[in-house]
Image: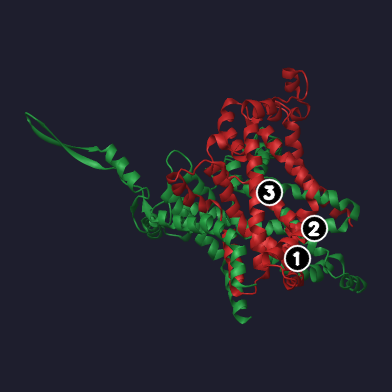
């Protein structure tokens, strides 16, 4: 295909992506180095027969005019990145100097909002990804073992947790774990504590969110593995069976190695998706106990005062995080492309 | 097939299915039955619902949400958004995906890598980039804006999927059309379009799901009177919980989920093939 033809076909989608993905990234970068204007202060001299006093007032008109004139605000460089709600360099240094033990240091860091959000995001990603892949794998093995007739309905039911809107799926579970809901009541009964609330403690909230994450992402792993299982060479399996390999040995030495490439692919997709965890936190109303990076941006953008600059700085840091996560893939494709 | 496997599978099916069944059943009760401190069986039998409405089932939650709180308006908006997003992103995506699948130049590969990076970025990181310019140019709060943004955000994924599908359509097909004197666009129009439908339908399903399920973009870029269903549900939670009418939210959640059930039932095969398309091959 010639360059000109390629361009003709590709131009519409390229325009859309340029205008609404690439330019907004630039806009985010620009906003993250600007802060809103401070109020214009005017000094007024009030003179009375007894002498003159100076007082300062906020010049509302001038402030409004300045803000309308330069909506981006004033240039502050990387100042926002270093402030308390982002990378918090000075607080980090103080924590390092002030804490005797390493555990102490981490305790202090986790009180800083950005690091708390980062900690939850990484924990969520690191637990949900492997556990949901493992659960999906076992479900796929089980489904593959039942008669063909039942597989359709079973796949249908298994897909539901994934297809349903994240906000809605999390809400459904949230109502059930409410202390008046069925799971919440069951947990209270099991623990023998009628006042136990799954929403009140940070640890339980995290566990709840992670359980929701596994519930909603396991179906993807299930479907991919189920498709992969159909391609496992049957004669290898049969010869292993003749050689006396047990069911577990067949899975361990034939099926798992065969499915390994799929696992890499799936882990990549799931790491990307789990890194952006957001809707469940809104649904579980868990902002007080668990914040992810995405939720952190959302709470800056919502509310009475829109903290655009702060949200922009967090966005840039989040995009940086995504690039770090993707870097093994990017480096690998770069290398394999260099060889080809 | 051991009994243990079977039991585990049954357990998974219950875990996957039960929350939906429970909530759908409970949406026809009143709040004090569905959220019953005294006895969980009340959510099943609904004694208080019977006492209030004379029957164990009531549509009061649905009436309140759809009519009183004007959920139908949000449903209508969602319909418009979804139809437009699917149509536009498939049009742009098929053209672009076809070009990417047929180009042998290096830049086609790099464009796909850029698309992968775009796909990996959380959509909310872009939102703060939209807000300021959209306020300035008075674009904020309108359905078309949200539609275009959703189309753009959806493009990287659409391109990846359609490129994978188009690679399976033999190159000889359009090359012979070119030999017969077609322009590139005629070859695309008369030779590729008729055979590309399976891929387009599958990709369209995922575009549908993205637009239908989106919360971030629609919540941040649409004004209150243009809301779609998902942000509307989120707003129910803020206002109605204080009024003690959480059942509006429960019944609208069930209303939002029902079309997805139908969709999965009808298009199960396409969804499975779409989910596995990239994976199994590479």
Whether label 3 touches label 2, CB < 8 Å: no
Instruction: Compare marks 3 and 1 and give the one earlier in the sequence.
Output: 3
The chain holding disc 1 is B
Q: Give residue A136's position: percent from left, percent from top.
A: 75, 57
Along the viewing direction, whichever of B56 and A303 lies nearer the viewer: A303
Residue under the point 81% across and 71% down: A254
Within the image, what quadrant is residue B81 found in?
top right
Colour assignment, chain A: green
Residue position marked by numbered label 1 in the rendering: B280
Residue A109 in the image, given as x and y percentages of width and height: 45, 55
- Residue at mark 2: A140
Provide the chain ID for the residue under circle 2. A
> Do we see residue A103 in this rendering?
no
The quadrant of the image that shows the C terminus of chain A is bottom right
Residue marked by disc 3: B208
Can residue A290 be seen at all in this image of the molecule?
A: yes
Tags 1 and 2 on a common chain: no
Q: CA distance from mark 3 to mark 1?
A: 23 Å
């Amino acid at each position: 295909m010639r360059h000109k033809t390629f361009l003709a076909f590709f131009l519409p989608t390229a325009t859309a992506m340029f205008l609404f993905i690439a330019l907004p990234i630039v806009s985010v970068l620009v906003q993250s180095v600007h802060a809103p204007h401070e109020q214009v202060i005017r000094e007024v001299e009030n003179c009375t027969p007894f002498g003159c006093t100076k007082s300062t007032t906020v010049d509302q008109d001038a402030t409004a005019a300045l803000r309308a004139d330069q909506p981006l605000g004033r240039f502050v460089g990387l100042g926002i990145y270093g402030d308390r709600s982002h990378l918090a360099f000075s607080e980090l240094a103080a924590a390092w100097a002030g804490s005797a033990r390493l555990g102490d240091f981490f305790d202090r860091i986790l009180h800083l909002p950005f690091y708390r959000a980062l900690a939850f995001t990484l924990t969520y990603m690191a637990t949900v990804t492997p556990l949901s892949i493992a659960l999906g794998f076992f479900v796929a093995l089980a489904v593959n073992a039942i008669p063909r007739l039942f597989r359709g309905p079973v796949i249908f039911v298994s897909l539901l947790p994934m297809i349903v809107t994240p906000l809605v799926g999390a809400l459904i579970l949230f109502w059930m774990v409410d202390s008046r809901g069925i799971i919440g009541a069951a947990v209270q009964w099991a623990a023998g504590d009628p006042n136990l609330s799954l929403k009140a403690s940070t640890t339980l909230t995290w566990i709840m969110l992670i359980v929701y994450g596994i519930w909603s992402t396991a179906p993807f792993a299930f479907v991919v593995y189920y498709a992969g299982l159909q391609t496992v060479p049957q004669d290898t399996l049969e010869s292993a069976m003749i050689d006396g390999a047990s069911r577990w040995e067949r899975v361990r030495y034939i099926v798992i190695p065969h499915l390994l490439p799929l696992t890499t692919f799936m882990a990549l997709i799931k790491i990307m998706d789990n890194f952006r965890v957001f809707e469940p936190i809104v649904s579980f109303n868990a902002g007080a106990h668990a914040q992810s990076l995405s939720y952190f941006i959302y709470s800056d953008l919502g509310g009475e005062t829109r903290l655009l600059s702060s949200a922009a700085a967090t966005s840039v840091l989040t995009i940086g995080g995504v690039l770090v996560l993707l870097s093994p893939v990017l480096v690998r494709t770069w290398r394999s492309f260099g060889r080809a | 097939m051991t009994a243990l496997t079977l039991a585990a599978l049954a357990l998974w099916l219950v875990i996957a299915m039960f929350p939906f069944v429970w909530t759908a059943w409970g949406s026809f009760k009143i709040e004090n039955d569905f959220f019953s401190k005294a006895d969980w069986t009340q959510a099943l039998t609904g004694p208080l619902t019977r006492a209030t409405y004379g029957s164990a089932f009531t549509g009061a939650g649905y009436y309140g949400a759809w009519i009183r709180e004007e959920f139908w308006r949000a449903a209508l908006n969602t319909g418009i958004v979804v139809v437009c997003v699917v149509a536009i992103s498939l049009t742009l995506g098929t053209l672009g995906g076809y070009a990417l699948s047929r180009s042998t130049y290096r830049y086609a590969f790099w464009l796909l890598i850029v698309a992968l990076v775009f796909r990996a970025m959380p959509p909310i990181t872009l939102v703060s980039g939209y807000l300021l310019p959209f306020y300035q140019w008075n674009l904020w709060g309108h359905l078309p804006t949200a539609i275009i943004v959703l189309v753009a955000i959806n493009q990287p994924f659409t391109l990846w999927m359609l490129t994978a599908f188009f690679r399976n359509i033999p190159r000889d097909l359009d090359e012979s059309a070119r030999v017969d004197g077609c322009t590139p666009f005629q070859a695309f129009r008369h030779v590729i379009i008729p055979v590309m439908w399976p891929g387009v339908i599958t990709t369209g399903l995922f575009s549908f799901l993205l637009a239908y399920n989106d919360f971030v973009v629609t919540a941040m870029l649409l004004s209150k009177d243009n809301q779609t269903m998902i942000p509307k549900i989120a707003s129910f939670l803020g206002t109605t919980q204080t009024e003690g009418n959480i059942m509006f939210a429960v019944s609208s959640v069930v209303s939002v989920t029902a079309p997805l059930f139908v969709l999965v039932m009808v298009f199960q095969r396409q969804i499975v093939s779409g989910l596995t398309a990239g994976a199994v091959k590479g």
